[in-house]
Amino acid sequence: MTNTPIRATLIPGDGIGPEIMEATLKALEALQAPFEWDVQTAGLAAMQTTGDALPPATMESIRSTRLALKGPLETPSGGGYRSSNVRLREAFKLYANVRPTKTIIPGGRYENVDLMVFRENVEGLYMGYEHFIPMDGDPEAVAIATGVNTRQGSRRLLEYAFENAIALGRKKVTVVHKANIMKALTGIFLDEARKLYKSKYEGRILMDEAIVDACTMKLVINPWQFDTLVTTNLFGDIISDLCAGLVGGLGMAPGANIGADAAIFEAVHGSAPDIAGKGIANPIALMLGAAMMLDHVKLHDKATRLRTAIDQTVNLDKVRTGDLGGSASTRVFTDALVARIAAA
């Protein structure tokens, strides 16, 4: 059954996306992962060729395969087109954003970090309900944003986080909120967490609570006091990037977007257009995203082999890209990784 073909959508992405995607595909080929790829486009590349940052063909492909591996997509700040990532989350109800953070290279500021962040992915302040109010001749004098959290959406994400934390053998779930100030918007999330824990998970795993600003401070001072964190959309985006910084940066941070209608795996970092085409990008984050994808389709052995090969390449072979203190190009790192997979 391992070699049964698995149809999946492939989106190379913008900037360094095609380079790190090529590296990741070489690793998956070395593992003999049985994906049958339908290559599509999104983001700036799609905007330039089709006039739509998320073309209908890409959407139809994901509807058909229900599985995708995606490179980073460029989103303009301020004006321009709306984020393709947000549109994908909305279209396919990708309510759970899962971001593991684990130390791969020892000797940094923090050792033995092992955290999981579960972020609500389709509600909160990221819904894009924004508008301007004109005043005194200025058409954009006042900016207003509306956040929306629902009990159903909160509960759905919380259940997913608790169930996965228990399945993975985690010890504690910390619910991160700002209910002391945003009593309705994040209070509803905290209230659902308390009720759900009391009715379903008490005695199976520990739960505690942390106000988001205090949580970020504690993560920097002593990240080992945390295990699994679950929170709303905006807070989860910020906290997961902070956690990535504990283990070497976004170049080490994969992400999974899990929903009712599809699962999309990615690198958390952006498209880094300033280094695109230079052959120096670190592909580890996308490779780790591919490992999460392998776990998702129950190819756990291949996922473990990929993670082991990454660990051996950076720690035993000392082959590292510039952001990790080395001098290897993307190609040199990939070749060393593929050699490790082949030798296993």
Image (cartoon, rainbow, N blue to C red):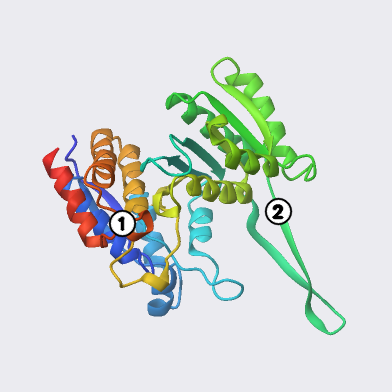
Rendered position, 102 above or below 206:
below
- Binning the other alpha carbons within 10 Å of mark 2 as few (below 14), some (14 to 19) or many (20 upward) gives some
Q: Which quadrant of the rendered structure holds the N terminus?
A: top left
To which residue does mark 2 refer?
Answer: 147
Examine the rendering and report whether any part of residue 122 can be seen.
no
Image quarter of residue 231: top right
The outermost residue toward the left is 343
Examine the rendering and report whether any part of residue 317 can be seen.
yes
* Camera-side residue of 249 and 138: 249
To which residue does mark 1 refer?
Answer: 326
Q: Do the residues labelled 1 and 2 touch (CB within 8 Å)?
A: no
Rendered position, 139 above or below 156:
below
Q: Which residue is located at x 51 percent, y 68 percent?
A: 75
| For residue 268, side relative to residue 150 (left or right) | left
Question: Residue 253 appears at what percent x and percent y?
Answer: 42, 49
For marks 1 and 2, give the one nearer the viewer: 1
| For residue 196, side relative to residue 341 (left or right) | right
